[in-house]
Image: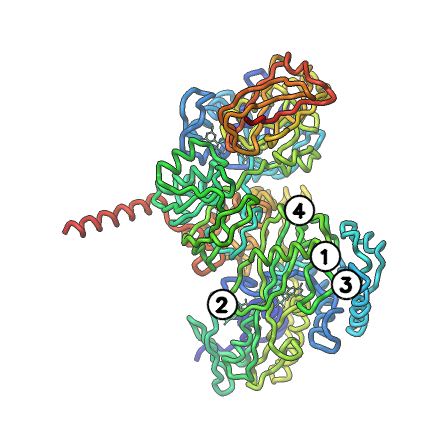
Amino acid sequence: MKEMYDVLIIGAGVVGCSIARELSKYKLKILVVEKGEDVASEGASKANSAILHAGYDPVPGSLKAKLNVRGNEMYDVLCKDLDVPIKRTGSLVAAFSEEEVKELYELFDRGIKNGVKGLSLITKDMVKEIEPHINDTVVAALYAKTAGIICPYGYTIAVAENAAQNGAEFVFNSEVIDIKKNGDFFIVKTHKEEFYSKYVVNAAGLYSDVINNMVGAKPFSVHPRKGEYLILDKDQGYLARTVIFQVPTKMGKGILVSPTVDGNLLIGPTSEDIQDKEFKATTREGLNKAITVAKRSVDKFDVRKTITQFTGLRATPDTEDKDFIIGESDVKGFINAAGIESPGFTAAPAIAEMIRDILKDAGLKLIEKVDFNPKRRPVIRFTELSDEERNKLIKENPAYGRIICRCETVTEGEIIDVIRRPVGAKSLDGVKRRVRAGMGRCQGSFCGPRVVEILARELNISPLEVTKHGRNSNILTAETKKFLLEKAAEVLKKEVYENA
Amino acid sequence: MLKYDIIIIGGGPAGLGAAVEAYEKGVKNIVIIERDKYLGGILEQCIHNGFGLQEFKEELTGPEYAQRFIDKVEEYDINVMLETMVLEITPDRIVKAVNSKEGVFTIKAGAIILAMGCRERPRGAIMIPGTRPAGILTAGTAQRYVNMEGYLPGKEIVILGSGDVGLIMARRLTLEGAKVKAVVELMPYSSGLTRNIVQCLEDFNIPLLLSHTVIEIHGKDRVEGVTIAKVDENREPIMETAQYISCDTLILSVGLIPENELSQKAGIELDPITGGPIVNEMLETSVPGIFACGNVLQVHDLVDNVTAEARLAANSAIRFIREGEFGKSNIAVKAGNGIRYVVPQKINVDNIEKRIKFRMRPVNVYNNAMLVVKSGDKYLLRQKRQRLTPGEMIDVNLSKDILKNANLEEGIVFLVEEG
Ligand SMILES: Cc1cc2nc3c(=O)[nH]c(=O)nc-3n(C[C@H](O)[C@H](O)[C@H](O)COP(=O)(O)OP(=O)(O)OC[C@H]3O[C@@H](n4cnc5c(N)ncnc54)[C@H](O)[C@@H]3O)c2cc1C
Ligand SMILES: Cc1cc2nc3c(=O)[nH]c(=O)nc-3n(C[C@H](O)[C@H](O)[C@H](O)COP(=O)(O)OP(=O)(O)OC[C@H]3O[C@@H](n4cnc5c(N)ncnc54)[C@H](O)[C@@H]3O)c2cc1C
């Protein structure tokens, strides 16, 4: 008979990967099935605000509130174990009128109810002290000390890698198209293979409704709410030290100005309900809106310093309370972690614990592994090493002496390492998300060809097969001389045909 | 710490030119540091001809032009460190670099010549909304793939921007069998050389759409098309003129930016317009003993000018190591009406032997205009110029005698007088 998994997780976003890691602490056979070519390559986990929210925002008593606050607390240990940069920058909700100040009191009260620590209401002077470049029109702010920033795809990759180190399996490029319950197990069909598993966890983000409805559980729907962003050059990063929110409206937490862990400046997101779950484009209107609104907080940034822009789609559940949909469905053994919109990233580790408990209650035996290793093998970041450390490294492996990405100072050694690691990089974007090669001010015009060469060599494929992000996103289309010969042959054939 | 008289950062034509000049003037304890595997810089991928008309009085390809200097570097046995990246320079002229043989090391220089060239502006810098598929690349990257690696980045191509690299690539890609559907330029004029427009577009019937831009990119995995539109006087797209062009590749040729991360970290003052260091008549930056030439200083369209600039930088560096600091600059050089920038940005007349060359670009296209140099109300020079265009750098030679008439307080201003 075919291999039987204990738990099959659909979706390799931060939620699916966090669940996989949590479960990899136990003697279980775990499989994560992802339709994209990589971890955090398709969904919300790669395109969001990257904020570890403090937790004053969600409605008291909701799952969002509980899991946000708990998740936030878990990140320090996790980031240490997984070797992922995190900065507890704190966040500000800035009020620019007396009217808005009233809202701050409400947020403050909600935060207290939710159990958020380190909240305070601060006056203009204190705001300016914390955030010298915020506009002078600021009146007061809610300061949340526990808020932080993180690299969302970097974290997700790290969690996945550690889960894999501890035995969890991953398949990519595999889209689940059907799920059948067969007695006491599920048959999960993707467009190219079939898997058997005793339990199925649905962590498919925006498609979690499709997956839920596929198995015949009580239906619900999730729709995309689009958020557009701009990322500015590192020389604009000094403009924000904390995450600067504005007083929220009903369309979300509003547009923020924030540093990123890597020192760039992030502006966005907009908030717009749409229909198309595949919509990934930015729009002129959206970007203009993000810029205009952000200028209300900090007007000193220079838009010409934009290095890239992106859109993220929030998986907004169409339920009355808009809360996360977490729990065993009416199909026994099928468990939802669905409709995880903001603060889903922050909540992810807490969601993973909750799913573990739900699985236990549903009859899954959890036997702890003695050899579970919570630590990811540390990542080498050339830029952060001392010269002595660099020299030692280069002596051991000369590839660390070759700089491939000049904007972010990334070496060939680092690139090779992330291709070879468990759940390694397979594409240009995969490399970029892991080591930042191509993420700097030149956006890969310099290192692109070199990374293509390294990927081809390491994966033992032709440069023509190297993609930007899997599927048909090939970078190169033909060999020059061959293409001309083929064209010439075509012309000849046509002539022969026409003459005949 | 190892010490060199002159450390040259970058082994393109600027760095090569400076090294050869220094050696020939007798300063031999020098080194060129280059991060690539070979010398020649951007020229190695410019396999078209059109280089060297002034310098060698013949038309060479990029690699041939570079080779003339590389041969001399080899003949003179000048120190070269390849695959070595400079990570940092300090105001007291200590250079930190890394390579896979020596690891990270520091060396000290009597004088430094910056010759790091420039990089291309990416998509982000021009804010084209839409998706982020494969098939969007800069012209220089396309050039590298085609000319050096032997791969085509696409088959049906739209080029945004009519900078020289884009124009050259329109021709190259056509010759390689790809279809270049259009070159789209935001401005009402091209930023490329006239000869390139004729030889690269007109000769191949490639349409050049002036006052147009790409307003959206389509395609999920690979580019499937772009929407272009005409723009109004404020360069805002006129939505009614939007038009879809199917293509699998969008090549960007939207400008070059001098590569000055190192300079910035060393505290060198940059000119916000050129993106290069502010220099004096000796091509010395705001940090004494650090000089700049080539595309790191200002983006050139002719390599011959780069070589000339490199010679001046080398001679200035030599003078610096022999005589020490130069006197303070006493005349400010400004760009007036119709001129975008002027290099050098300040001068000290006492350091000028006979004459000095100023290089600048106009902000617009002017026909039969007067190029004027003034100091206060006084005219120092009036020259009729048949055609001024932003795609072609202007040189103006001023003699020491003329400059002596400048008013120190007012400085000198370059401007265009029309009509
Ligand atoms: C604009 C925006 C801003 C946000 N800001 C923040 C923030 O600052 N802080 C915060 O805490 N949270 C934030 N969030 C929320 C957070 O990003 C999400 O809650 C979190 O990333 C959700 O993770 P996930 O794993 O559930 O979903 P995803 O990351 O979307 O992962 C789902 C995965 O399932 C895969 N999948 C779907 N269908 C199938 C199928 N049929 N077969 C196989 N695989 C499938 C997808 O390819 C995808 O990889 C934001 C979200 C957005 C969109
Ligand atoms: C595509 C194209 C077409 C052109 N066509 C023509 C033409 O037809 N005719 C003509 O006369 N001119 C032409 N030019 C212009 C001319 O070739 C350039 O202006 C000239 O090459 C600039 O020389 P450079 O030495 O300043 O820069 P580059 O050639 O760019 O050299 C700079 C070098 O510095 C190195 N470097 C940078 N940073 C570091 C670091 N930190 N450490 C170590 N090394 C570093 C780089 O690797 C590079 O090799 C063209 C230019 C381009 C780009």
Q: Are marks 2 and 3 in contact (CB under 8 Å)?
A: no
Q: Secondary structure at mark 1?
A: strand
Report crowding for label 2: few under 14, some 14 to 19, many 20 or more residues within 10 A (C-alpha): many
Disc 2 sits on a residue from what chain?
A
Is disc 2's CB within 8 Å of ligand 1?
Answer: yes
The x and y percentages for residue B352 are: 64, 15
Q: Nearer the viewer, mark 4 or mark 1?
A: 4
Q: Which mark is residue A302?
A: 4
Left or right: B29 as drawn, with respect to A490 = right
Classify A161 as above or below A335. Answer: above
- Asked which secondary structure carries label 4, the reply is loop
Q: Quadrant of residue B316?
A: top right
| Residue situated furthest bottom in the rendering | A183
**Which chain is disc 1 placed on?**
A
Mark 4 residue crowding within 10 angstroms, few (<14) / some (14–19) / many (20+): few
Q: Residue at x 36, y 46 (%)?
A: B178
Is B155 situated above or below A91?
Answer: above
Subunit under mark 3: A
Tag 3 secondary structure:
loop
The answer, for residue A397, to whether it is visible in the render is: no
Residue at image coords 38%, 42%: B206
Tag nearer the camera, 2 or 4? 4
Report the disc number at residue A35.
2
**Same subunit: marks 4 and 1:** yes
Instruction: State the CA–CA distance, disc 4 to disc 3.
Output: 29 Å
CA gap, disc 2 and disc 1 = 31 Å
> In front: A100, or A320?
A100
- Residue A87, disc: 1
